[in-house]
């Protein structure tokens, strides 16, 4: 029997095969990583690093300098609970993020002498007192690439309580301090405080007013009452109470509010700190100072009133901070401490929000907007910053205000993404790469007003702008040919005499509103979708229910809400789009003028146009054709045309806004040099000329965009065109223009970031 023997295997051949297989495996691994991540470093791709948390770290300054300075400056109330509340607000925010943002508190001593190189973001939470060394360290941290979030009045004082001024904030953030923003209540700005001492209850007027020759004291004809007032005023003069030393007692607390500056005093017992800093119960006076803002006491105010401690702050559209927030959204800020307003003075700094509120200010001036910035962002050295002129926990009033709560969620997420250099993506609010939109809406109260639409339509045709025309259907019968022309030129909608909610429940209103719509559709020979009431105020739930039942798609209330952009209503009114008032009406402006000055009226309306463009919202001009001067109208139309607005009729604006809500965009950082972008259309309509912006988190000189188009119903070849794109803001923001996106279709882009020195240094053979 023959014995089998194993063949000898060449050792050299075996080693050669093994090395070749290993090299091939490494090559495949590198190619796969490069395909997914773009340029990368071997250190980052090493399996040994898998599972290590490499997320940026945040340092939160817990400042005893600020506590000490507060006690020095406030002998009445040395409590520093507000400092702890501010810190708690930041801690809760970091802990509630998904994924969690790692952070830790640092002390004043750590900021002065500790190692900051392990942190990417430094938060200065209302750090009013800072040492010179701390300021130097913060600036060095930013020069070396660190990011800073600062709020309210950083570094205003030194640790010993002495005044430094605004130099740190101005030099570091590229702004100029312009002043404080106080609370607002109705027709007054209000400031209240509690002082130790005694004073008579009552209403007080400034002494300079009562001593003026123009001051006429009120009289009742009752001699006893007049004598009582004199005695009360004389008694008030005997009190030594410095906070009201320049005021004169005027009336009891039951008096109607004056329409001038005034103050109110109320005696209480309260726990206050004495000159030695000891807390004890003592006599105290609550004093509220009211500063008159100039509006007529009987004027209708077409905007929601807010409490005395709240102001509205407008967030600008088109910035990395405002991604996914409605353009021109007006968020509530609790101004229990006066807010800070600044003006941007350096190109490295950009405004993200401002205090000016067109709803409450009498006259618009664009300089007022530029000089009232409340949030700015930008660069210092190699680092980044965001400055907010208020405390973080002053934003919003809590989860019970769902709309504000949603906006603030995006606001702070975007802010931390910007500071941590993570990409942020948003779909532009308007089509064709426009930064703002406009509507020109005529509201005819009478047949004479409908007749006036003819010359105005000629003016719109001359500049190629569509109009929206509101008419009362039951009065429009004699103007069929004109209405049909207006419908072809833009959109004709129902103008209704509804006054109050008691005009009917949804079913009753639905029958009436459907009848009005059908009358108008028969006249214009086309669809009618829009509605507006002739009365000022908010359209209530009964009317909205009627509009849904009558198949309307949008309505135009004349009350000023939280945004200058349309809004898709919630359940059960989700088929309705609200297009609110975004500028003061012609009648509001004329009422604020001492005389009917057409030149001044035109100038103020053009200022409003510039404001809306600055905010990035919708300029909704609603005019009365019987009052609108044709020359003024032509000037405004020229401003709209030259201002590069997307101008559309009401039905087109409502359709676009509904379409935009279904456009979704996501971005994912795959590596330092590659991002993954997905844009989808979840609507039932085709989206055309939509624009998407991506804040890249760094500066680049060029990008390589590799597209992929997928349809869930039908595969599409890979050889599709690269979408038009451009880099802006010094190579930190990439814009992609999507020419067309069909329903339920999405596009995927692999984008390589090129030209960044930090990325260039990290190649696969590093």
Image: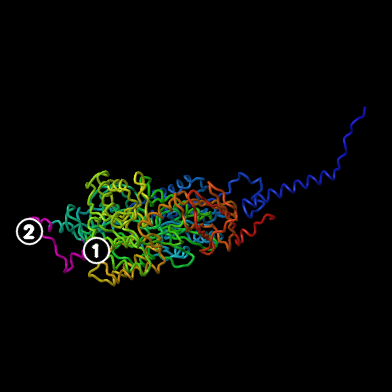
Span shown in magenta: 205-230
Residue depicted at 27% across the width and 71% down the height: 598
Residue at which label 2 appears: 221
Earlier residue among tags 2 and 1: 2
- Count of numbered tags: 2
In front of the other: 51 or 700: 700
Q: Quadrant of the image for the N terminus?
A: top right
Residue extending furthest top?
1
Q: Is residue 178 visible?
A: no
Instruction: Confirm whether the magenta stretch covers residue 212.
Output: yes
Q: Position of residue 583 (x, y in %)?
A: 32, 61
Secondary-structure class at tag 1: helix
In front of the other: 757 or 749: 749
In front of the other: 411 or 612: 612
- Within 10 angstroms of label 1, few (less than 14), some, or many (20 or more) residues? some
Q: Position of residue 303 (x, y in %)?
A: 29, 55
Q: Residue 370's image quarter?
A: bottom left
Residue depicted at 86% across the width and 42% down the height: 10
Q: Position of residue 258 (x, y in %)?
A: 20, 59
Q: How is the image coloured?
A: rainbow
In front of the other: 502 or 452: 452
Q: Quadrant of the image for the C terminus?
A: bottom right
Q: Which mark is residue 449?
A: 1
Q: Is residue 171 toward the left or the right of residue 266 in the image? A: right
Q: Is residue 632 visible?
A: yes
């Amino acid at each position: 029997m023959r014995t089998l023997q194993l063949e000898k295997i060449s050792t050299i051949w075996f080693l050669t095969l093994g090395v070749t297989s290993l090299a091939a495996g490494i090559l495949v691994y590198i190619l796969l990583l490069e395909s997914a991540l773009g340029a990368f470093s071997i250190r980052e791709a090493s399996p040994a690093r898998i599972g290590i948390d490499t997320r940026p770290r945040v340092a939160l300054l817990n400042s005893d300098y600020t506590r000490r300075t507060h006690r020095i400056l406030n002998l009445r109330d040395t409590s520093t609970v507000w400092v702890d509340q501010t810190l708690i607000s930041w801690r809760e925010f970091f802990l509630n993020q998904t994924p969690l943002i790692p952070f830790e508190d640092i002390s004043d001593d750590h900021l002065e002498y500790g190692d900051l190189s392990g942190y990417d973001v430094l938060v200065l939470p209302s750090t009013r007192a800072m040492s010179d060394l701390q300021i130097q360290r913060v600036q060095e941290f930013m020069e070396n690439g660190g990011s800073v979030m600062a709020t309210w009045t950083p570094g205003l004082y030194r640790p010993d309580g002495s005044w430094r001024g605004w130099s740190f904030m101005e030099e570091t953030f590229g702004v100029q301090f312009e002043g404080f923003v106080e609370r607002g209540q109705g027709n007054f700005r209000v400031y209240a405080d509690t002082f130790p001492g005694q004073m008579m209850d009552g209403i007080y007027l400034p002494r300079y007013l009562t001593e003026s020759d123009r001051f006429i004291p009120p009289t009742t004809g009752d001699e006893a009452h007049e004598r009582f007032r004199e005695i009360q005023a004389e008694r008030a003069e005997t009190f030594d109470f410095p906070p009201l030393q320049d005021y004169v007692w005027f009336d009891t607390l039951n008096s109607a509010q004056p329409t001038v500056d005034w103050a109110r005093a109320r005696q209480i017992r309260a726990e206050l700190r004495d000159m030695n800093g000891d807390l004890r119960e003592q006599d105290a006076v609550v004093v509220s100072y009211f500063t008159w803002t100039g509006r007529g006491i009987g004027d209708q105010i077409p905007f929601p009133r807010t409490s005395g401690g709240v102001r509205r702050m407008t967030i600008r559209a088109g910035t990395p901070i405002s991604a996914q927030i409605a353009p021109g959204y007006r968020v509530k800020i609790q101004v229990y401490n006066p807010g800070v307003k600044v003006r941007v003075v350096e190109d490295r700094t950009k405004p993200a929000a401002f205090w000016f509120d067109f709803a409450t200010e009498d006259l618009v001036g664009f300089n007022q907007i530029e000089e009232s910035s409340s949030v700015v962002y930008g660069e210092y050295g190699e680092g980044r910053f965001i400055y907010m002129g208020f405390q973080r926990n002053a934003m919003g009033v809590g989860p019970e205000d769902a709309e504000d709560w949603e906006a603030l969620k995006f606001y702070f997420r975007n802010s931390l993404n910007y500071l941590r250099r993570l990409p942020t993506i948003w779909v532009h609010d308007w089509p064709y790469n426009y930064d703002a939109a406009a509507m020109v809406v005529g509201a005819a109260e009478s047949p004479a007003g409908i007749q006036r639409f003819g010359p105005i339509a000629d003016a719109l045709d001359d500049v190629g702008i569509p109009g929206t025309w509101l008419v009362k259907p039951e009065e429009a019968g004699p103007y069929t040919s004109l209405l049909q022309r207006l419908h072809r030129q833009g959109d004709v909608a129902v103008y209704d005499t509804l006054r109050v909610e008691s005009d009917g429940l949804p079913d009753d209103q639905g029958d009436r509103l459907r009848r009005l719509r059908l009358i108008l559709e028969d006249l214009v020979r086309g669809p009618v979708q829009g509605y507006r009431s002739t009365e000022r105020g908010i359209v209530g739930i009964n009317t909205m229910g009627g509009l849904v039942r009558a198949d309307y798609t949008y309505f135009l209330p004349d009350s000023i809400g939280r945004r200058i952009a349309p809004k898709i209503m919630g359940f059960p009114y989700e088929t309705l789009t609200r297009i609110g008032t975004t500028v003061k009406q012609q009648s509001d402006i004329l009422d604020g003028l001492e005389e009917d000055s057409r030149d001044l009226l035109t100038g103020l309306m053009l200022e409003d146009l510039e404001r809306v463009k600055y905010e990035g919202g919708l300029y909704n001009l609603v005019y009365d054709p019987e009052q609108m001067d044709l020359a003024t109208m032509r000037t405004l139309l020229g401003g709209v045309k030259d201002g590069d607005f997307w101008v559309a009729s009401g039905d087109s604006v409502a359709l676009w806004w509904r379409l935009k809500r279904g456009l979704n965009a996501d971005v994912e950082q795959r590596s330092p040099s590659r991002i993954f972008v997905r844009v989808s259309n979840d609507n039932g309509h085709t989206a055309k000329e939509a624009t998407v912006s991506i804040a890249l988190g760094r500066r680049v000189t060029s990008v390589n965009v590799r597209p992929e188009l997928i349809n869930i119903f039908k595969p599409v070849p890979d050889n599709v065109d690269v979408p038009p794109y451009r880099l802006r803001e010094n190579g930190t923001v990439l814009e992609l223009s999507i020419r067309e996106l069909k329903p339920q279709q999405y596009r995927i882009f692999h984008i390589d970031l090129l030209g960044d020195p930090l990325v260039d240094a990290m190649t696969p053979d590093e």
